Image: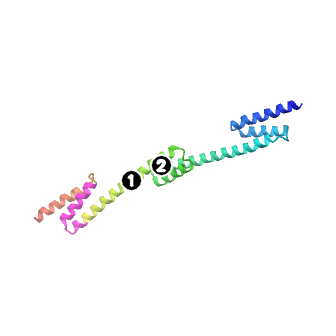
Amino acid sequence: KKAEQKAKFDQAIADGDSALTASNFEVAKKKYEEAQLLDAASQVPKQKLIELGKKEAQANAEKDKNQKYQEAFNAGVAAMGTKDYTAAKEKFLAASTIDNTKKEAKDKLAEVEKILADNAQAQAQKDKYDLAVKTGSDLLAQNKLPEAKKKFEEASALDPAQTLPKEKIQEIDGLIAKAD
């Protein structure tokens, strides 16, 4: 009888260990509790239940971390889809902070940072163009023809696709020719 009970106890512990290895926490808990009932004096089932509790908490924390990472990453992708690159950068940065082992968030972050830098550069170029055109127009209005022509040439160099600076240069050349 005692040998039979010891065999059942050993089997319950072995089954519990197998279930724990497979992260099947429910089955592992049942098996360790079964072993505890078979030998209440033994410390083994109690220790196994403590180990199980730690592994289960670890697994839940990992699952929670993965879920938070995925939520942040997906929000970043959605923000990119609407061209809200500042929000996308924020979300990919958050995802990278949550799990810095995942490459996809880092890659997307680099992609968004490049887009933001390119956009800032394009905006700076546009601002320079707009300023040159405005200054050229102001100078033209004041009949400062050589200075105005210089500003429109600058604008044309900044954005060769625009026709306005070229038209203004021709207009100024015409006014200079008339004055001479």
Mark 2, other Cα within 10 Å: few <14 / some 14–19 / many ≥20: many
Q: Are marks 2 and 1 in contact (CB under 8 Å)?
A: no
Horizontal side of 35 relative to 160 (left or right) equals right
Compared to residue 51, the image places residue 138 above or below, namely below
Q: Quadrant of residue 128?
A: bottom left
Question: SS class of the residue under badge 1?
Answer: helix
- Taking the spot 50% from the left edge, 44% from the top edge, the residue there is 104
Q: Position of residue 16 (x, y in %)?
A: 75, 36
Q: CA distance from mark 2 to mark 1?
A: 15 Å
Which residue type carries mark 1? Asn
Answer with left or right where residue 118 lies relative to residue 171.
right
Three-letter code, disc 2: Leu
Q: Secondary structure at mark 2?
A: helix
- Mark 2 or mark 1: name the one nearer the start of the chain: 2
Q: Main secondary structure of the magenta part?
A: helix
Q: Magenta residues?
A: 138-158
Name the residue located 77 percent from the left edge and 43 percent from the top edge.
Answer: 47
Q: x, y percentage for residue 157? A: 25, 54
Q: Which mark is residue 99?
A: none
**Residue 86: horizontal and vertical position, in percent?**
47, 55
Residue 99 in the magenta stretch? The answer is no
* Residue indicated by mark 2: 109
Which quarter shows the C terminus? bottom left
- In the rendered image, the vertical position of residue 169 relative to residue 112, given as above or below: below
Expressed as whole percent of the image width and height from the top left, the position of residue 127 reads: 33, 59
Which of the two residues, 41 or 98, is positioned nearer the viewer here? 41
Where is mark 1, residue-wise?
119
